[in-house]
Image (cartoon, grey):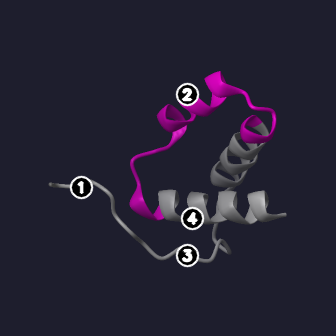
Amino acid sequence: MRYRCQTFKCLEDENLNDDAENLAKDFVEAVLNNDKIEMLSFGAKIPNDRIFFKRLVNKIIKLLIK
């Protein structure tokens, strides 16, 4: 069986730009409000950049923990 999952270390978000910060906040707000449409459309808003994605996920995790 083949899986398409990858593991990665979360990076510090010290260089997180405003776009990623806003995107993370918008996603967390959608999760907390149970806005399924916004959560599903979230993937289309993420640029194809591995470092950006890692920092974004790290920020989302930190916001959800708070």
For the C terminus, the image quarter is: bottom right
Q: Earlier in the sequence, mark 1 or mark 2?
A: 1
Cα distance between the residues tagged 2 and 4: 19 Å
Kindly indicate whether the residue at mark 4 contacts the one at mark 2 (C-beta within 8 angstroms). Answer: no
Q: Residue tagged by mark 1? A: 3
Q: Position of residue 29 (x, y in %)?
A: 79, 40
Badge 2 local density, few (<14 within 10 Å), some, or many (20+)?
A: few
Majority secondary structure of the magenta segment? helix
Disc 2, SS: helix
Mark 1 residue type: Tyr
Residue 41 circle label: 2
Badge 1 local density, few (<14 within 10 Å), some, or many (20+)?
A: few
Q: Earlier in the sequence, mark 1 or mark 3?
A: 1
Q: Residue tagged by mark 3? A: 11
Q: Residue at x 59, y 58 (%)?
A: 56
Disc 1, SS: loop
Q: Earlier in the sequence, mark 2 or mark 4?
A: 2
Mark 2 residue type: Ser
Query: Which circle, 4 or 1, is nearer the viewer?
Result: 1
Q: Residue tagged by mark 4? A: 55
Image quadrant assignment for residue 35: top right
Q: Earlier in the sequence, mark 4 or mark 1?
A: 1
Part of the protein shown in magenta = 30-51
Cα distance between the residues tagged 4 and 1: 23 Å
Cα distance between the residues tagged 2 and 3: 24 Å
Q: Residue at x 63, y 22 (%)?
A: 37
Q: Position of residue 55 (x, y in %)?
A: 57, 64
Image quadrant assignment for residue 12: bottom right
Kindly indicate whether the residue at mark 1 contacts the one at mark 4 (C-beta within 8 angstroms). Answer: no
